[in-house]
Amino acid sequence: MDGIAVPQRLGRPRKRPRRLAGDKAYSVKRIRDWLRAHGIQAVIPRKENESLRHDQRTVFDKDTYRRRAVVEQCVGWMKECRRIGTRFDKLAVNFHGMLQLAIIRRYLKLLFSDRT
């Protein structure tokens, strides 16, 4: 979380996001407390067997959680590219280049597909 820089229209980038979405595996008191201490809203659904003992005032934002699917789909698509999913490249600069090539390939495929 310390390496994040969220661009702003004016001024320097924010270091912390406003909200953080995670799946039910992240529904832990320690994580929720850390997010609250740093002023980040947790968008994490509660587990079925979990009571509201952690925080009685938490309201789950379903619309924000649904937008998380875009990120999940992008990661899933990148893992379809075998070289990226298995991290063949040892150097970060080479891996970053392969990510860029994969994104360019994906963009061109969407741009010139017959379905559009």
Image (cartoon, rainbow, N blue to C red):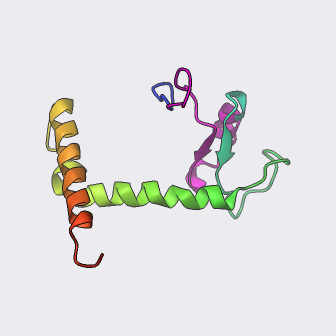
Q: Position of residue 17 (x, y in %)?
A: 58, 35
Seen in the picture, residue 88 relative to 109 is either above or below; the reply is: above
Labels in figure, total: 0
- Residue at 53 percent across and 20 percent down: it is 12
Going by the image, does 85 lie left or right of 46?
left
- Which image quadrant: the C terminus? bottom left
For the point 65% across and 60% down, which residue is it?
63
Residue placed farthest to the right in the image?
56
| In the image, residue 11 lies in the stretch drawn in magenta | yes
Task: Specify whether 50 is left or right of 89.
Answer: right
Look at the image and say whether residue 37 sits in the magenta stretch.
no
Q: Is residue 5 visible?
A: yes
Residue 25 as seen in the image, left or right of residue 75: right
Q: Most extreme residue toward the bottom, as rendered? A: 115
Quarter assignment of residue 97: top left
Q: Identify the residue at image location x=66%, y=32%.
A: 34
Residue span colored magenta: 7-35
The image quarter containing residue 80 is: bottom left
Is there any visible trace of residue 87 in the rendered image?
no
Task: Identify which residue, 18 or 85, lies in the foreground.
Answer: 18
Q: Quadrant of residue 81?
A: bottom left
Nearest to the observer: residue 102 or residue 1: 102
The picture places residue 33, in percent across and down from the top left corner, at 71, 35
Q: Nearer the viewer, residue 110 or 1?
A: 110
Q: In this view of the protein, which residue sits in the foreground, 75 or 18?
A: 18
Residue 6 is situated, as x and y percent measured from the top left of the image, at 51, 32
Task: Find residue 73 and report its horizontal and vertical position in percent.
Answer: 40, 61
